[in-house]
């Protein structure tokens, strides 16, 4: 009984640290959104969000490296995984940098109404910073030191957001988002470099490196699909809407689901190491109920945010942005389906079911794309409504999968 109480407390404490730190960090996010709304025209705002979305899709692929395997590894295999994992991280990050340069070049014809080549290309340089301390960050999560991880993460986010505001005030224009990403990467490097973890060096053993890289490839597929699911609306809206309407939609997303998704990702960051720890200690009794309870509590945050949109948007932003009330509220509700879907993905990943996780991410992406192209919404409100209705269908996959598993359990 004591072990169960401790495990529940651990999950709530880790989640509280990460979500609490994320809420504080996102207060600074409001400062950057306000600065962008004040210093950028709607067309420029849309271009900035488009460039950051491209970077975000690729940046989330950093999760596809050796991190998940290091966190869930057994103690005896950890030293070899760390040495080879560091090599995998360099491989992944250099590849991402090259890929983003290529995508930056292709934006000339993918999004001809938005000149974002320089922004996307310069943000790609941040990938060359992360490998130096990536395995240290994984070890901090493995050890469930979420208080430390949340403090570093929130500090980096705060500095990034303040850098956007300061750069815009200084007249940097759209280059402000590039300076902010560089500031984030430098602070992340310095903070984790100072953290004491299990010592390890770069190493290469062909069998282990190949196994890690193959598994990372499976994870990359899942993360790529998840990233596209989270950002595909920006890419499609940039093509369907006029630059002015796209700017309003981009603002609504950053003021609504952009804040909610950060809390959701913080929760999943706390949840995954917790599940792995419970599986290693064989204390999995009532694990599903605990996860369901905490996920439900996180969902309530998004409902509250959606209800408060008509309150905080008029206070914080000028009249030209206030036509996005309904769009922002609807997008906040999309985060509810997102957190439940990503929670199920975390459970699958903790069990090593990477292929099934990839199938789930592909299903969610296809459902969203099918909904958007079936309705072809050309206004922000209708676009947000289509996304919300599509997000409800995401939950069909875990529901069907759990039903099949339940039916295959034979009675004693």
Image (cartoon, rainbow, N blue to C red):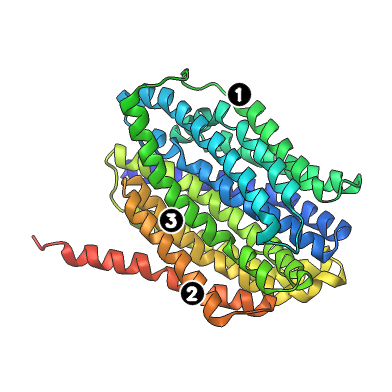
Distance between the alpha carbons at the discs numbered 3 and 2: 23 Å
Sequence-wise, the earlier of marks 1 and 3 is: 1
- Give coordinates of residue 208: x percent, y percent: 33, 28
345, above or below 391, in the image? above
Comes first in the chain, label 3 or label 2: 3
Q: Nearer the viewer, residue 176 or 18?
A: 176
**Is label 1 or label 2 in front?**
2
Q: Are marks 3 and 2 in contact (CB under 8 Å)?
A: no
Is the C terminus in the top left, top right, bottom left or bottom right quadrant? Answer: bottom left
Residue marked by disc 3:
343
- The relative height of residue 145 versus residue 42 in the rendered view (above or below) is above
Give the structural element (helix, strand or loop) at label 2. Answer: helix
Quadrant of residue 282 within the rendered picture: top left
Residue holding disc 1: 193
The residue wearing badge 2 is: 370
Residue at 73% across, 74% down: 325
- Between disc 1 and disc 2, whose residue precedes? 1
Q: Which corner quadrant of the image does residue 308 belong to?
A: bottom right
Mark 3 burial class by Cα count in 10 Å: few <14, some 14-19, many 20+: many
How far apart are labels 1 and 3 at the CA level?
A: 30 Å
Which quadrant is the N terminus positioned in? top left
- The secondary structure type at the circle numbered 3 is helix
Q: Can residue 156 be seen in this snapshot?
A: yes
């Amino acid at each position: 009984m004591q072990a169960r109480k401790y495990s529940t407390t651990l999950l709530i404490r880790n989640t509280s640290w990460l979500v609490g730190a994320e809420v504080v960090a996102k207060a600074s996010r409001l400062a950057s959104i306000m600065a962008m709304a004040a210093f950028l025209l709607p067309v420029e705002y849309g271009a900035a969000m488009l460039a950051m979305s491209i970077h975000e899709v690729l940046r989330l692929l950093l999760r596809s490296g050796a991190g998940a395997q290091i966190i869930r590894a057994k103690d005896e295999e950890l030293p070899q995984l760390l040495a080879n994992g560091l090599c995998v991280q360099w491989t992944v990050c250099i590849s991402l940098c090259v890929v983003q340069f290529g995508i930056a070049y292709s934006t000339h014809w993918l999004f001809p109404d938005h000149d974002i080549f320089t922004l996307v290309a310069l943000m790609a340089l941040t990938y060359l910073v992360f490998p130096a301390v990536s395995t240290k960050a994984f070890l901090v999560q493995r050890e469930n030191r979420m208080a430390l991880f949340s403090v570093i993460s929130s500090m980096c986010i705060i500095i990034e957001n303040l850098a956007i505001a300061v750069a815009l005030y200084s007249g940097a224009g759209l280059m402000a988002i590039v300076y902010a990403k560089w500031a984030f990467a430098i602070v992340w490097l310095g903070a984790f470099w100072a953290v004491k973890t299990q010592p390890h060096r770069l190493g290469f053993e062909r069998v282990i490196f190949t196994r890690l890289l193959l598994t990372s490839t499976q994870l990359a597929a899942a993360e790529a699909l998840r990233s596209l699911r989270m950002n595909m609306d920006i890419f499609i809206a940039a093509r369907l809407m006029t630059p002015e309407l796209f700017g309003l939609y981009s603002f609504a997303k950053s003021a609504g689901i952009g804040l909610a998704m950060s809390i959701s990702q913080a929760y999943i960051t706390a949840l995954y190491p917790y599940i792995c720890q419970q599986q290693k200690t064989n204390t999995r009794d009532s694990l599903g109920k605990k996860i369901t309870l905490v996920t439900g509590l996180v969902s309530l945050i998004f409902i509250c945010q959606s209800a408060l949109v008509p309150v905080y948007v008029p206070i914080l932003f000028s009249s030209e942005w206030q036509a996005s009330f309904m769009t922002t509220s609807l997008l906040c509700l999309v985060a509810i389906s997102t957190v439940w879907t990503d929670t199920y993905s975390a459970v699958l990943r903790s069990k090593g079911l990477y292929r099934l996780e990839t199938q789930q991410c592909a299903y969610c992406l296809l459902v969203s794309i099918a909904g958007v192209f079936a309705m072809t919404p050309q206004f922000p409100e209708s676009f947000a409504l289509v996304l919300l209705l599509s997000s409800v269908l995401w939950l069909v996959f875990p529901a069907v999968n759990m039903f099949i598993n339940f039916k295959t359990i034979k009675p004693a």
